[in-house]
Amino acid sequence: MVRSRGGCSNCKRRKRKCDETRPDCQACQRRGIQCEGYNTPLKWTNGIASRGRFAGAAIPDLSLCGGSSSSAVEDTAAASSTSSTRARTATESPSQVVVRSKSASVSSSGGIEGASQHSSSPGSSAPVSGPARAPAQVPTPVPGEGPAPTPESAGAAAPPAAAPVSPGASNDPNRQLFEKFLFAGLHRLYTTESHSWIQSHFRTMAKRSRAFFVVSAAIQAYLDDGFSVAAMEHVDHALQTFRAELEGRHDLRDISTMAAGILLCTLCLLQARPFTMYLQLISGLYQLETRLSVLLPPAGHDFATRHSIEVLAVMDMRTSVIGRVAPSMGVWRRLRRLQDTWAEGKLPGVEVVSGLPRSFLDILADIADDSREEIEARLWAWPGEIGIHSQCVLWDCWRYTAVLEARRLERQKKMAAARALGGKEVEAAGDASPELSPPTEVVMCRLTASIYALHRAVRLPANQHLLLHNGLLYPLVVAGLEVPLLMAHPEWKEILDDLRQSFLSKDSFHAMRMIDEMLTEAWEDGTDVFDIDKAARSRGIEVAVF
């Protein structure tokens, strides 16, 4: 008898010839037994599972899989997605993915609607969460790892208990990317120093939100490999995981999910993709316009909540984005007005993402609404705050940059008014009143001197832990638009070119290349009225400079 190689499972097991009749073969029917069909049966054999809910386990027992079971659905979804679908989804924005799956729409009362299961095409399956499912957790960090929390973070809510680490956790690509992100990619996203409470805060958020964990890993994958297929697969998985978390949490609105959404916006801005409209969606989802006082009560407010809202507020500022698609919502000003009602008043100190004192950010938040004279008066009168010497130089860079920005905005307003009058010139108000500020050329000189000093200070071995270099992008862009002054002073342009090249050599992401391209276009334009916002919008991009 010839063994059947394409027959039903019964015939192959018994080494009988099978006539391969479907749905049941006649050989089984003649023997009065149930034909087991023609699908290849899957069975658990000796060895270690490499993926899925049993990753790292020797037997298929959920009770022994610990932390790895929490990511089972996400891992399975990521493994089953085809490359074409991943590439398509990776090019979509976070809100497009949410809308496509009918999830997370905001109702008239502010709640989350549309939590029904989404239907997706074959190969594009996404992790699915239900209302009864607890938020997935990631393995706990090694005890003693990471810096101790600062007094500022002492009021943060205690994180939930961490799930036990599975034997295969160290082989999880997302885990490896997340650990690398904490000590590499994360350092590109804020402007204080490398050893701070930020790492421990990110670990806490990753325990509370699977999406936060996966998006962090996706950012590191993008920083490592750009638009490669492997990196875009991580981005696709991050979008799907965030979508599923929005569906599953319903009205819980855990702040860690907001933080994950902000990280997705960060992923967009690294790619120079528009993201301000997604900030508006997050704001609407958490009702920041009406429920800010509920999220941040005068007493006992959560540190993680305050920090997340503060970061969103900085990203929402008028000066933070070139080519803004959605207008600023004024979140920073609302947040500071709320703090005025607290017993301790407005919070002092330095905001960690921008690296700037909160009192200085108060001025920047008004730069597009107040007159140039008022802004300049406040900038020159700003007393500063206590900080290390390099920080103080950075703050001076931003002070001079804000003066130049206020004057640039005034020039744009005059040009717009002239166009409205049919090309007639609008009477100029002069460069600035002598008692308020020096001429633009002097301000530019002081700015380039401060950039020169800080750019070299951060290269010293003693300052390797400082991340203040990240804060020089906004001064670089605004100073680079003062083309007539740079033509008159080639040594200033040389300083800016040196800084520009350092950014290009360190940051390979798309946003920096777009900045370089637009500054080159401004130089070729040869005037001080080049509209960089218009240049960004014509490219369909938004560029963050904070």
Image (tube, rainbow, N blue to C red):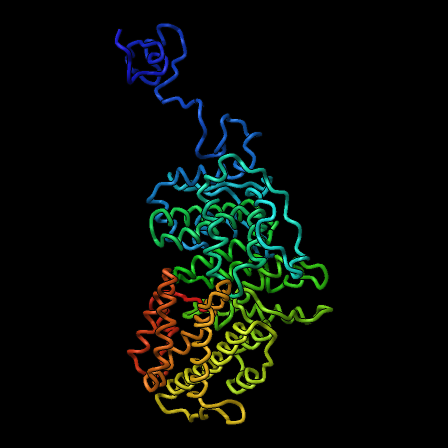
Nearest the eye: 233 or 149 = 149
Q: Position of residue 25 (x, y in %)?
A: 33, 13
Which residue lies most toward the front here?
461
Which residue is at a point 66% across and 50% down the rendered structure image? Answer: 158
Q: How many marks?
A: 0
Q: Nearer the viewer, residue 160 or 411?
A: 160
Pick whichever, 73 or 360, lies toward us.
360
In which image quadrant can residue 270 be found?
Answer: bottom left
Q: Residue 346 placed where, x, y %?
A: 66, 71
- Indicate left or right for 155 with 318 as reference: right
x and y, in percent, of residue 157 in the image: 66, 52
Looking at this view, is 71 or 118 the one in front?
Answer: 71
Task: Identify which residue is drawn at 32% across, 69% down.
Answer: 517
Quadrant for the N terminus in the image: top left
Question: Furthest residue to the left?
Answer: 2
**Residue 368 seen:** no
Residue at (57, 49) in percent of width and height:
145
Which residue appears at 42% of the width and 55% of the height?
93
Q: Is residue 207 above or below residue 11?
A: below
- Is 453 situated left or right of 163 in this image? left
Work out whether 313 lies above or below 448.
above
Q: Position of residue 127 (x, y in %)?
A: 48, 41
Q: Is residue 361 above or below residue 420?
A: above
Q: Is residue 492 visible?
A: yes
